[in-house]
Amino acid sequence: DQQVKQNSPSLSVQEGRISILNCDYTNSMFDYFLWYKKYPAEGPTFLISISSIKDKNEDGRFTVFLNKSAKHLSLHIVPSQPGDSAVYFCAARDSGGGADGLTFGKGTHLIIQP
Amino acid sequence: NAGVMQNPRHLVRRRGQEARLRCSPMKGHSHVYWYRQLPEEGLKFMVYLQKENIIDESGMPKERFSAEFPKEGPSILRIQQVVRGDSAAYFCASSALDSSNQPQHFGDGTRLSIL
């Protein structure tokens, strides 16, 4: 039972355009969401997070949107740069008493075309 | 480098041997988490520890796997009598406080290969 789903295994975007990565979740108890970026042979690097009391959080080129009613979040990267090519993981947590670890999606491989 | 340090980066073991994976959290962090990633999959939570205590091991297989985070020294993930299915990347993460609304920061992982 996959509680965090990233339905696009890969996404190709032209340099300078907007990249939009999507994530859906099924557990209504999740209240904290994060996006991580991962290069091959390295660990995930934290990018941005959002609490369920918000619907938007912005940090530089990265913005995360949360739609609680749809159980959907998205990561926008604008403008996209070649160094953004990586696998992006969506993760979620139930702070109220679920497992203390994060629940991850399977990732989306973002490819930025020059 | 004050990041999460894992060693070894690569570990090869034969079936039946023991594997020991080490993790030193970021400076100032006292909460450690272990995750396993199989090929083409996301990371799966295994265990959450604070110094000298296992807080949540709900993701840990019941047999052959154990974890500790002693008062002094790194956290250790131990896999006894390894089998081929244990081949995976094992990642450690740390956070400063109780992980509520605090991001976890990851090491570069240990890639375990079972011959």
Image (cartoon, rainbow, N blue to C red):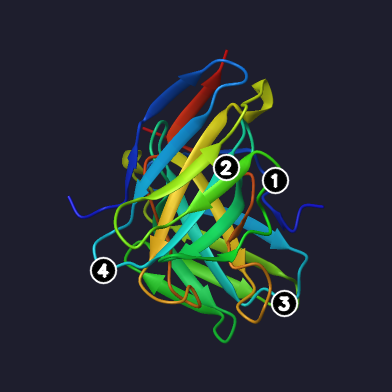
Q: Is mark 1 on a helix, strand or loop?
A: loop
Point out the residue furthest to the right here.
A1
Q: Where is residue B41 in the image (x, y as percent from the top left)?
A: 64, 38
Q: Position of residue B45 (x, y in %)?
A: 60, 53
SS at circle 3: loop
Where does label 3 land, which residue? A29
- Visible in this render: residue A55? yes
Chain name for mark 3: A
**B74, B112: nearer the viewer:** B74
Image disc number at residue B36? 2
Q: Mark 1 points at which residue?
A: B61
- In the image, which is nearer the foreground, mark 4 or mark 3? 4
Is A23 placed left or right of A50 in the picture? right
- Which amino acid, mark 2? Arg
- In terms of image quadrants, where is residue A26? bottom right
> Residue placed at 62% from the left, 17% from the top?
B15
Q: Give me the C-alpha separation between circle 4 and circle 3.
A: 29 Å
- Mark 4 or mark 2, which is nearer the start of the sequence? 4
